[in-house]
Image: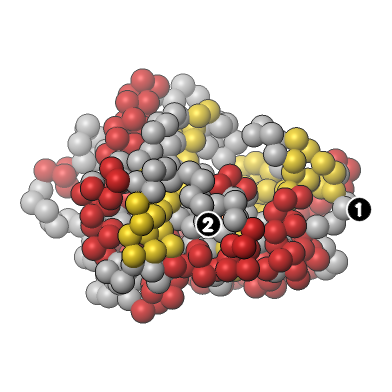
Amino acid sequence: MQHHPCQPDGLFPLDDLLPPGTGRPPAPAAALRGSPAAARMLDVREIHAEPEAAASARGREIIARFPRARVVEVPSHWRIPGLHGDRGSAARWVRVKSGTLVLGVRKTLTVRPNGRSADWIAPGPSNGCAMACAYCYVPRRKGYANPITVFTNTDRIIDRIGRHIAAQGRKPAPNQCDPDAWVYDIGENGDCSVDALVCDSTADLVTAFRRWPTAKASFATKFVNPDLLAYDPRGGTRIRFSLMPAEDSRLLDIRTSPVSERISAAGDFLEAGYEVHFNLSPVVVRPGWEEAWAGLLRELDDVLPPAVKAQAAAEVIMLTHNRGLHEVNLEWHPRAEEVLWRPELQEAKLSEDGSRNVRYRGGAKRTALERLRELIATHAPWLRVRYAF
Ligand code: SF4
């Protein structure tokens, strides 16, 4: 039987039978949640809440955590007037992301097959994000700034994932998602490390996955939240630090942790029991991009401890963009569009959800991917590429 490397044989990890706290890593002395640094990311002044979400235990806990916030009742977390689809929001983009939360109840608990980054996309505990990457597809779904929506029914989400895992049985054969475990992406539409500043949904999911020996949670992040080091995942969660050259990140990854911080956190997360992978994404083709990526890969090679390198793998994802987002970005961050919007290199693509996206043309994309693989082979040959597209 395959199981997580940090977990003993048997249905329940031994530590779960011990008194609370026994055998667990100590919580960090100073938690990030509640600190001035966390308040810079999230200074919530307005909470839009569905009545059922506001009345739930998690909803009440979140509302109590942000006592300065005005709570506004909304019939649905979708299409909130003045928040989603309001062109005026483009000008207030970052203020909306840091100052607004939405609380809703997740109605659709569908587990979708993926097969690329993960075997399955789990129903996530949130959507929307407090960070503001200029290329982010997350706002495309709800419109404009799209701050964090927390789904307060995490217990139902976890229950659904648990039943899905039980129905799969063991993974029959290794694939590029994972050799042993079924991989469930829990953060498709947001960033679980920032969600952890709001409530315990990320902690609850990490805890749940350590009990499921045939499965593994996975999420990508651009935010280093040391509170996650105390979650004790025992190999049941893969954290994927998203990386791009620092100069691109400074222009495009608004409000995120600096790339060097994400890289230097990798060793701590591995030691704390996470599997640590990297998303090399999005790859933005611009003058000088090859030298910049070579520099990033050399930094990985210099800085990462051998133990991180030994288990690391990467996903490589070329930039896709979108005409609607391009137009909105021109209103709040036009400099980003100088590198993101390159019609001479890009072609239109109708995506699954019907939105009109653009991606690098076939030839240009193939050449760039080949070049990046060569750079990885030269500067970080230990870094296995799980997939590239
Ligand atoms: S961190 Fe991820 S979800 Fe958040 S804005 Fe950036 S790309 Fe979007």
Q: Position of residue 60 (x, y in %)?
A: 23, 55
Discs 1, 2 touching: Cβ within 8 Å: no
- The residue wearing badge 2 is 82
CA separation, marks 1 and 2?
Answer: 35 Å
Taking the spot 33% from the left edge, 60% from the top edge, the residue there is 71
> What label sits on residue 344 in the rendered view?
1
Question: In the rendered view of the protein, which quadrant contains the C terminus?
Answer: top right
Q: Nearer the viewer, residue 386 or 73?
A: 73
Q: Amino acid at mark 1?
A: Glu
Can residue 258 be seen in the rendering of this structure?
yes
Identity of the residue drawn at 48% across and 44% down: 78
Packing grade of label 2 (10 A; few <14, some 14-19, many >=20) is few
Q: How are the residues colored?
A: secondary structure
Say above or below: 365 vs 171: below
- Counting residues from the start of the chain, the first of labels 1 and 2 encountered is 2
Q: Point out residue 329 in the picture as x, y percentages from the top left corner.
A: 70, 62
Pick out the residue farthest to the left. 19
Corner quadrant of residue 388:
top right
Q: Is residue 119 above or below residue 289?
A: above
Q: Secondary structure at mark 1?
A: loop
Badge 1, how many Cα within 10 Å: few under 14, some, many 20+? few
Of residue 230 and residue 107, the one placed in the foreground of this image is 107
- How far from the left and from the top, in percent, is residue 202? 35, 51
Judged by depth in the image, the label closer to the viewer, 1 or 2, is 2
In the image: residue 212, left or right of residue 316: left
Quarter of the figure that contains the N terminus = top left
Q: Residue at x 75, y 57 (%)?
A: 327
**Quarter of the image holding residue 214?**
top left
Q: Which mark is residue 242?
A: none
| Above or below 369: residue 177 | above
Question: Which three-letter amino acid code belongs to the residue tagged 2?
Answer: Gly
Numbered disc 2: secondary structure = loop
